[in-house]
Amino acid sequence: QVQLGESGGGLVQAGGSLRLSCAASGRTFSNYAMGWFRQAPGKEREFVAAISWNTGNTDYTDSVKGRFTISRVYAKNTVFLQMDSLKPEDTAVYYCAAKRGYYNMYMASNYDYWGQGTQVTVSS
């Protein structure tokens, strides 16, 4: 049984930082892509960042480039999302997700497994 568990969300002022963690278990994630998505109230779930479990290659949506960093600790099956220079528009529930293969990472429907989400709120 694959499980993804996010942690690290919270309330922060604009300009602040948070680090989200995603602990993955239940299978070997080699050849998988790990992604972070977010969903604000009334909006669709959107791609934030992805990382190849094997190679460490990364991709980001334009709005977070230079502010967010995705990384993974291979031995601990954990993926992180370091979020700096946070803005009120970053407020959303953040989800960790996993899919086979590092391609077509931008669409939520392509992912096989999802975590329960963690709330991030950025105040102005």
Image: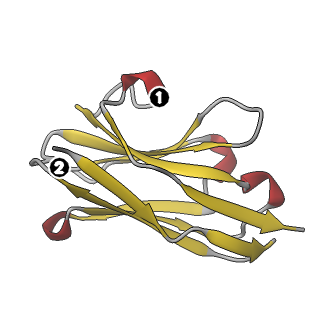
Q: Which residue is mark 2?
A: 54
Compare residues 49 and 13 and report the one nearer the observer.
Answer: 13
Whole-percent x and y of residue 55?
21, 50
| Residue type at the position of mark 1 | Ala
In the rendered image of this protein, does residue 15 appear above or below residue 70? below
Quarter containing the C terminus = bottom right
C-alpha gap between disc 2 and disc 1: 21 Å
**2 or 1: tag closer to the N-terminus:** 2
Residue 113: give x, y in percent of width and height.
31, 37
Kindly identify the residue that appears in the image at 49 percent across and 48 percent down: 95
> In the image, what residue occupies the spot 71% across and 70% down?
85
Quadrant placement of the N terminus: top left
**Position in image of residue 16 (x %, y %):** 72, 77
The amino acid type of the residue labelled 2 equals: Asn
The residue where tag 1 is placed is: 108
Relative to 40, is 7 above or below? below
Secondary structure of residue under mark 2: loop
Question: Residue 5 lies in what quarter of the image?
Answer: bottom left
- Is disc 1 placed on a helix, strand or loop? helix
Judge depth for marks 2 and 1 and give the one in front. 1
Mark 2 burial class by Cα count in 10 Å: few <14, some 14-19, many 20+? some
Q: Residue at 35% of width from left, 30% of height from top?
A: 111
Q: Which quarter of the picture shows residue 41?
A: top right
